[in-house]
Amino acid sequence: QSVLTQPRSVSGSPGQSVTISCTGTNSDVGAYDYVSWYQHHPGKDPQLIIFDVRRRPSGVPDRFSGSKSGNTASLTISGLRSEDEADYHCSSYAGTYTWVFGGGTRLTLL
Amino acid sequence: QVQLVESGGGLVKPGGSLRLSCTASGFSFGDYYMNWIRQAPGKGLEWISYISRTDSNTKYADSVKGRFTISRDNANSEVSLQVTSLRVEDTAIYYCARVGRGAVSGTSLDLWGRGTLVTVSS
């Protein structure tokens, strides 16, 4: 059982937007503005796409955006493209160099 | 090329041991904190261990504490995970990951390897 709760799957059509939620507690997501999101194409290395709730590393398109309200963080992907089909994992820094993760969400393009 | 490459996984019987390694290249390895994260089949990611830049501070998830040991060799740009007393539920892909710094927050993991598979089965 993962610490953070994500939907198992979401889907969308090319060009549309999807939002993936990530629910934690007052000890992790709610306690820190340190939520990260990772894109993972199976068999490849996971890629950091959002850190500190809403910041994007250099090179990540602005189609990816993050937000947080209370104990729930969200990742929104707009203008869906075929290459966005992947697993998405949320994570929260939990203090003293420990991290917690969600169960992952499989994004399928219709 | 900036990358992390894991090795050392394999098939092992319950109670057995392995030494997983992660070799870094393309960046100043000694400047970064490092972690190991795993993903069991059909499950989400699970953080399991952290090590500071100088090996002086380590952390473990409760699920592996007392059985796994993280270490690093900055001269050879390598971080290792000695895994012992293995259980069936330790079956997973094991990833090493770098803690960000500079432009990327030190609370996120900004570089990952492709992982090494550990299968625990009799």
Image (cartoon, coloured by chain):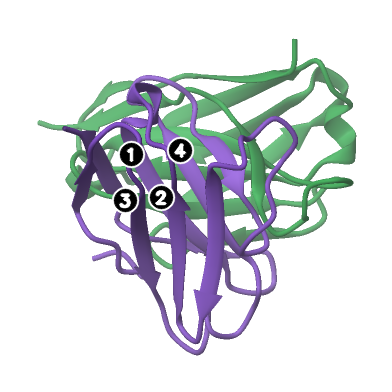
Chain colours: A purple, B green
Image quadrant in which the N terminus of chain B is located: top right
* Between discs 3 and 2, the one toward the N terminus: 2
| Label 4: element kind | strand
Residue behind mark 2: A89
* Between discs 1 and 4, the one toward the N terminus: 4
* Same chain, labels 1 and 3: yes
* Between discs 1 and 3, the one toward the N terminus: 1
User: Do callouts 3 and 2 mark residues in contact (Cβ within 8 Å)?
Assistant: yes
Instruction: Give the distance between the C-alpha atoms of the residues marked 2 and 1, in whole angstroms.
Output: 7 Å
Residue behind mark 3: A104
User: Do callouts 2 and 1 mark residues in contact (Cβ within 8 Å)?
Assistant: yes
Q: Residue at x 60, y 85 (%)?
A: A31
Label 2 lies in what chain?
A
Q: Residue at x 49, y 44 (%)?
A: A38
What amino acid does circle 1 point to?
Asp
Residue behind mark 4: A39
